[in-house]
């Protein structure tokens, strides 16, 4: 959802690509090199605070030196990656290989965060979010490991968080109460009423019920468990809601003792802070009191099948599907190499990329362009997230009758590739992709590094082999030079002569949801039937006990904290140079961009006719994927891959910082390339502007279907965002456009288009949008580049602008649309969808960015989220997440995520306002809210993104500094006043929207109920 989640399960469908080891940020590349120098100085065998250095691995291509160590007593493994990056990272991970589907590793991940010996308060992890300037805090459970990472730029903060994390994983309290809250429990529906029915409750129980309604999740889960049936992967590590109630508190504690032990741990640190300081703390606070155990967590190799298998599974029908007849998914999966062979894994991930990625790949051409399905199957390409890796190809959104056809296409495609191989340019494009991703600097390098290493390191793959990307590239090139059939031979070996092959088919079943509910009823019924009167009394008492515990005020002073005085008072300003080229406004920002130049532009539109507005997102989605000039879309994609990091057009809408009736709308262009290819990149843009291809009907059909199904599938993960957008749609002009172009309205709109058999009118509309947008009349541009290349970048830009027709008309900035009046409406809307959970939002009309109350509302939103909503809606209500936010579009919004409740949550929103007005919060609470807001405001910005807030949002450094000053100054009275002024029901216009199942409460005529069923 966002970074404030306590935990997120890694989607099984996450794929490792050949560029997964990406260097992302090096904010101090041009400064000292002390962290690197120190690391290079270590010697194998050297003893450091209970550890012994094993290897020192220089990785010049990533500007990094890696040091691996082993803990002398427990054999805990340690990787330190020294790099001149101030965004330091810590992570501790454990190999967690459950042998059932009770979700024990997932529930343990949650309960370890519920308090520890040194920090005996409820949920110290969440509390630390507000006492820290962390740039990332999270934990997640994958199929075979659990990890706990954080990052921060502040050294004191690093040590505070390190201490809390170490104590949480090695010395958690794991009380029964925590197990019941986070895992599962039997409790009265209304816990104060012993006559109300006894039901299942629990955070993970509800989270997994929500997760397992997603057809993608169901498919991915079955694919993994069926392809790897002999050991841990046959189980659901997140927990199957029907199996979760089999888990006991005792089993949870045993799993902790055997899995969360240093002998089963992998530690990781990254950045410019010295290694020895970290080792000293880890030894002193955690490891010194442990002795060695032999953890039984190894995953044996999967036994190879002697013949292929087939499986047929079900999911719920998708009411949002464009064509109800086309809801079948089929894929063919193969078991490949062990990921412990990292060169083979590297080769297979490149081969996978060549096979399935982008319009130039044979599977895209054979499967997607056949126009018989809506998109690739949810599992596609190489999967290195299990010890034995796999590869899958398939389609979703097909007719039942087309299953055989898809299977034949897959087989034929492998055969054809084995015969003809790949064009040299395509291989060159993949290697270009690796080069560009190594040079592109992002701010999350350290986190991405450990996230990509962990799944292989977890099975003891050599770190040196994985880290040296260039060695792998060279070896790959040599293999190809020695044997031109190198990749074709792999295709033969793994896909044509491999009997460990699974064909998985998923079809919707009308009563799928009802059957699951009945199953749950049955499990519940048999448990309740065994309860005697005493048991029921215990359940009632424990329900009250948990509720009391949740209501109890607690002493948080045991937790370390930063102070508001630790926040930098002054903002780091960005130096920009502005000029006019050919009448076009150009913003230049010189940065250490490492041989890459970034181009951004906004083409604004004074007004968009109402009938064209909903087509703008589709236009953005397709225009760079249709081909241009004399190039087909395949040829265009080939050049795009060879020369750039991708060409993107996105929708642009930006509220004026001073006035909610003024805004800027249009589209943004976004692309980057290696300096040597910058000119070629512009020639691709020129082709799109001067001769876009809006003729190819087949291509448009393919893209429309993919888009519609992507949007429909995004709802389970993004339901809160859709609810929030809709709640804001009747409150401001920008909110209205956001809804039409990116809300549930857009999802339905795309569904209607995808259902229509004739796209002639759609194509015409796209041509009209193109005529409005593709010119330089209202364009402004931005370049982020290294000092040495800026002049040439400007020359290239000038040539590009010169090649465009027309004349620049825009002299002042920005080009604004002003609405004379807007009548906000109070709406109550329910989007009825077949989910077992709700996504609830309330939006309230508030103020624009520069208004003096904006800063107060921003701090208030954070305060309410952390000190009220979290407790009421997550802890007590059992929702996966909740919060409030003050958006730059001028609306204040409450939300909940995967929430078993709806109206009860709306009541909690109201009570949070009463709470804020009453003011039972302390100065420490307010300071925490400030720290939390500043940690987002001061998050590191990559060189490629410097100056972008001004460019896209017209928010200057001066405005941001003023906002900073106001946030520091916010007082308790300010918070109470704005809560009364804006959030109380009688105060302002507000709207309520939610997504969720049929609901008796919304049958009254005060509610607009949208039903999408076909
Ligand atoms: Zn979870």
Image (cartoon, rainbow, N blue to C red):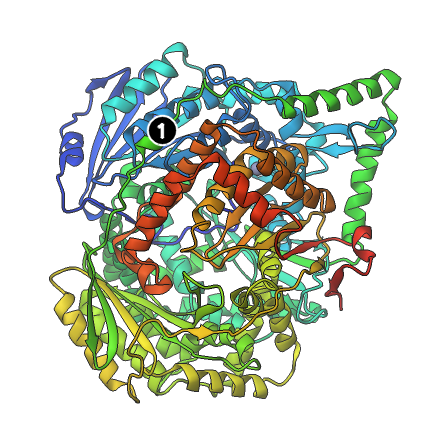
Kindly state the secondary structure of the residue where label 1 is placed: loop
Image coordinates of residue 594 in percent, x first then y, are 19, 55
Residue 847 in view: yes
Counting every numbered tag in the picture gives 1
Q: Quadrant of ligand 1?
A: top right
Look at the picture and state if 755 lies above or below 291. below
Towards the viewer: 507 or 479: 507
Is 912 on the left-hand or right-hand side of 27?
right
Q: Is the CB atom of the residue marked by disc 1 within 8 angstroms of ligand 1's nearest atom? A: no
Image coordinates of residue 186 in percent, x first then y, are 76, 28
Towards the viewer: 208 or 15: 208
Look at the picture and state if 755 lies above or below 787. below
Task: Quadrant for residue 672, please give it.
Answer: bottom left
Residue at image point 66% right, 39% down: 911
Look at the picture and state if 909 lies above or below 816. above
Residue 304 in view: no
Residue at image point 34% right, 73% down: 638
Residue at image point 48% right, 58% down: 495
Which quadrant is home to the C terminus? bottom right
Task: Quadrant for residue 105, please give it.
Answer: top right
Task: Quadrant for residue 657, please give it.
Answer: bottom left
Is 395 on the left-hand or right-hand side of 78?
right
Image coordinates of residue 46 in percent, x first then y, are 19, 20
Q: Which residue is mark 1?
A: 563
Is 121 on the left-hand or right-hand side of 539?
left
Q: Residues within 10 Å of mark 1 (few under 14, many from 20)?
A: some
Residue at image point 59% right, 42% down: 882
């Amino acid at each position: 959802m966002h970074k404030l989640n306590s935990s997120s399960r890694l989607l099984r469908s996450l794929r490792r690509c050949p560029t997964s080891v990406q260097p992302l940020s090096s904010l101090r590349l041009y400064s000292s090199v002390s962290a690197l120098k120190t690391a290079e100085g270590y010697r194998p065998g050297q003893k450091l605070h209970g550890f012994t250095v094993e290897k020192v691995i220089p990785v010049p291509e990533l500007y990094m030196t890696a040091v691996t160590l082993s803990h002398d007593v427990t054999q805990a493994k340690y990787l330190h990656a020294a790099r001149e990056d101030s965004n330091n990272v810590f992570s501790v991970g454990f190999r967690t290989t459950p042998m059932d589907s009770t979700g024990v590793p997932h529930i343990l991940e949650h309960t370890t965060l519920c308090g520890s010996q040194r920090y005996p308060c409820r949920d110290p992890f969440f509390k630390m979010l507000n006492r820290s300037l962390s740039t990332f805090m999270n934990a997640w459970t994958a199929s075979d490991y659990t990890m706990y990472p954080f990052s921060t730029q502040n050294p004191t903060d690093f040590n505070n968080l390190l201490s809390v994390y170490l104590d949480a994983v090695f010395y958690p309290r794991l009380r029964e109460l925590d197990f019941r809250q986070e895992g599962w429990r039997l409790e009265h529906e209304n816990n104060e009423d012993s006559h109300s029915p006894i039901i299942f409750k629990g955070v993970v129980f509800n989270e997994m019920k929500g997760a397992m309604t997603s057809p993608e999740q169901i498919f991915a889960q079955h694919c993994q468990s069926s392809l790897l049936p002999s050991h841990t992967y046959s189980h659901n590590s997140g927990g199957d809601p029907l199996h979760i109630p089999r888990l006991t508190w005792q089993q949870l504690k045993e799993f902790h003792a055997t899995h969360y032990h240093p002998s089963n741990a992998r530690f990781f640190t990254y950045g410019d802070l010295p290694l020895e300081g970290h080792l000293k703390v880890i030894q002193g606070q955690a490891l010194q009191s442990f002795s060695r155990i032999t953890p039984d967590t190894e995953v044996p190799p999967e036994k190879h099948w002697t013949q292929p298998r087939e499986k047929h599974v079900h999911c719920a029908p998708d009411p949002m599907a464009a064509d109800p007849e086309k809801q079948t998914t089929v894929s063919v999966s193969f078991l490949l190499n062990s990921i412990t062979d990292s060169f083979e894994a590297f080769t297979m991930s490149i081969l996978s990329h060549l096979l399935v990625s982008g319009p130039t790949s044979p599977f895209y051409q054979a499967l997607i362009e056949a126009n018989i399905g809506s998109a690739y199957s949810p599992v596609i390409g190489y999967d290195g997230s299990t010890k034995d890796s796999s590869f899958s190809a398939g389609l979703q959104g097909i007719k039942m009758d087309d299953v055989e056809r898809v299977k034949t296409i897959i087989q034929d495609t492998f055969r054809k590739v084995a015969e003809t191989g790949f064009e040299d340019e395509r291989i060159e494009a993949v290697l270009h992709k690796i080069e560009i991703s190594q040079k592109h600097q992002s701010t999350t390098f350290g986190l991405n590094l450990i996230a990509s290493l962990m799944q292989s390191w977890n099975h003891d793959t050599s770190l040196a082999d994985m880290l040296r990307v260039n060695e792998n590239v060279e070896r790959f090139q040599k293999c190809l030079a020695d044997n031109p059939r190198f990749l074709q031979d792999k295709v033969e070996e793994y896909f044509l002569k491999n009997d460990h092959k699974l064909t998985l088919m998923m079809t919707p079943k009308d009563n799928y949801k009802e059957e699951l509910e009945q199953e749950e009823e049955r499990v519940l019924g048999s448990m309740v039937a065994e309860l005697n009167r005493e048991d029921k009394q215990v359940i009632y008492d424990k329900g009250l006990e948990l509720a009391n515990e949740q209501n109890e005020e607690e002493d948080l002073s045991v937790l370390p904290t930063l102070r508001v005085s630790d926040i930098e008072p002054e903002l780091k300003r960005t130096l920009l140079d502005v000029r006019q080229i050919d009448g076009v406004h150009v913003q230049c920002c010189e940065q250490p961009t490492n041989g890459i130049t970034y181009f951004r532009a906004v083409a604004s539109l004074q007004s968009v006719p109402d009938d064209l507005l909903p087509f703008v997102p589709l236009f953005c989605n397709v225009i760079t994927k249709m081909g241009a000039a004399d190039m087909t879309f395949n040829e265009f994609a080939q050049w795009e891959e060879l020369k750039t990091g991708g060409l993107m057009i996105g929708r642009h809408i930006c509220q004026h910082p001073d006035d909610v009736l003024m805004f800027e709308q249009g589209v943004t262009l976004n692309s980057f390339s290696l300096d040597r290819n910058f000119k070629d990149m512009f020639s691709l843009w020129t082709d799109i502007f001067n001769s876009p291809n809006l003729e190819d009907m087949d291509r448009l059909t393919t893209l429309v279907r993919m888009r519609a199904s992507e949007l429909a599938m995004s709802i389970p993960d993004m339901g809160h965002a859709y609810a929030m957008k809709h709640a804001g749609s009747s409150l401001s002009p920008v909110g209205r456009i956001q809804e039409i172009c990116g809300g549930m309205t857009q999802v339905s709109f795309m569904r209607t288009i995808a259902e229509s058999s004739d796209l002639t009118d759609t194509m015409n509309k796209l041509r009209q949008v193109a005529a409005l947008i593709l010119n330089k009349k209202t364009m402004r541009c931005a370049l982020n580049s290294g000092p040495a290349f800026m002049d040439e970048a400007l020359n290239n830009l000038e040539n590009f602008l010169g090649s465009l027709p027309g004349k620049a008309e825009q002299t002042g900035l920005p080009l604004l649309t002003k609405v004379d009046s807007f009548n906000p409406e109070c709406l109550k809307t329910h989007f009825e969808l077949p989910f077992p959970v709700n996504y609830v939002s309330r939006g309230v009309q508030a103020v624009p960015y520069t208004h003096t109350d904006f800063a107060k509302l921003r701090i208030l939103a954070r305060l309410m989220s952390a000190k009220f909503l979290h407790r009421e809606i997550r802890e007590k209500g059992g929702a996966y997440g909740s919060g409030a936010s003050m958006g730059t579009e001028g609306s204040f919004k409450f939300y909940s995520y995967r929430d078993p409740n709806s109206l009860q949550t709306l009541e909690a929103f109201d009570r949070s306002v009463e709470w804020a007005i009453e003011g039972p919060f302390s100065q420490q609470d307010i300071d925490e809210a400030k720290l939390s807001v500043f940690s987002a405001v001061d998050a590191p910005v990559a060189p490629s993104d410097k100056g972008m807030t001004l460019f896209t949002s017209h928010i200057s450094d001066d405005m941001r500094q003023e906002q900073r000053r106001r946030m520091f100054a916010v007082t308790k009275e300010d918070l109470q006043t704005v809560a009364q002024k804006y959030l109380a029901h009688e105060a302002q216009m507000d709207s309520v929207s939610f997504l969720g199942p049929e609901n008796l409460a919304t049958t009254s005529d005060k509610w607009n109920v949208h039903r999408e069923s076909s």
